[in-house]
Amino acid sequence: MTSRFLLVGLLLATCSLVALASDLSPLQDFCVADLKNNVPVNGFVCKDPKMVKAEDFLFRGLDKMGNTTNAVGSNVTTVNVNQLPGLNTFGISMVCIDYAPWGQNAPHTHPRATQILVVIEGSLLALQQSLFSLANICAFP
Ligand SMILES: *[C@@H]1O[C@H](CO)[C@@H](O)[C@H](O)[C@H]1NC(C)=O
Ligand SMILES: *[C@@H]1O[C@H](CO)[C@@H](O)[C@H](O)[C@H]1NC(C)=O
């Protein structure tokens, strides 16, 4: 009898296991990257919070068009932790891609990330020849 209860209990325990997995929540509200610190961590060491300035959370320059006179006819302006230290540990970054007519962006992947693309001027062929134009948004895995 005891072994039957043990077996039923074991079966219930086995069947009720739920897999939960996610990245851990950050330990702090912000961790402005100390880009000059070369301590090898996965990401950047936090700057001393007393030294954090508003400019650490500010990027200016997406209004300037990139030079698209190159082999692919496009130019990617990146806004990640290197340009905007306040993004450190937030898990988000941004790029602005300028295209010359018929310019291209080489095929690539986004491991562990999703890309949201917004067309703000002109039109763009993407996702198996779909045409996107002003204010259209598409998500790329
Ligand atoms: C992108 O544009 C910037 C600003 O004009 C320029 O400095 C850079 O060399 C360009 N990059 C490429 C790959 O053409
Ligand atoms: C854009 O890049 C090309 C090729 O490097 C260069 O010849 C041209 O002067 C650049 N244009 C500007 C506005 O910087």
Image (spheres, rainbow, N blue to C red):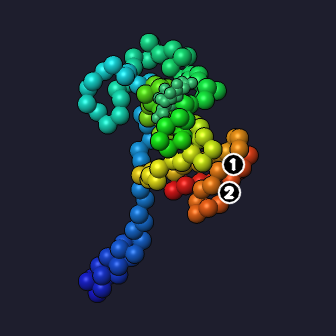
Residue neighbourhood size for the residue with mark 2, other residues' Cα within 10 Å, grouped as few (<14), some (14–19), many (≥20): few
Look at 47% across and 16% down and name the residue there: 52
Q: Distance between the residues labelled 1 and 2?
A: 7 Å
Residue neighbourhood size for the residue with mark 1, other residues' Cα within 10 Å, grouped as few (<14), some (14–19), many (≥20): some
Look at 46% across and 53% down and name the residue there: 107
Residue type at the position of mark 2: Leu
Residue 25 lies left or right of residue 123; in this view the side is left
Residue 131: assigned label: 2
**N-term mark: 1 or 2:** 1
Task: Give residue 56's position: percent from left, percent from top.
Answer: 50, 20
Toward the right, the furthest residue is 134
Residue type at the position of mark 1: Ser
Residue 115 seen from this side: yes
Q: Residue 15 falls in which quadrant of the image?
A: bottom left
Q: What element carries label 2?
A: strand
**Marks 1,2: beta carbons within 8 A:** yes
Query: What residue is pinned by disc 1?
Result: 123
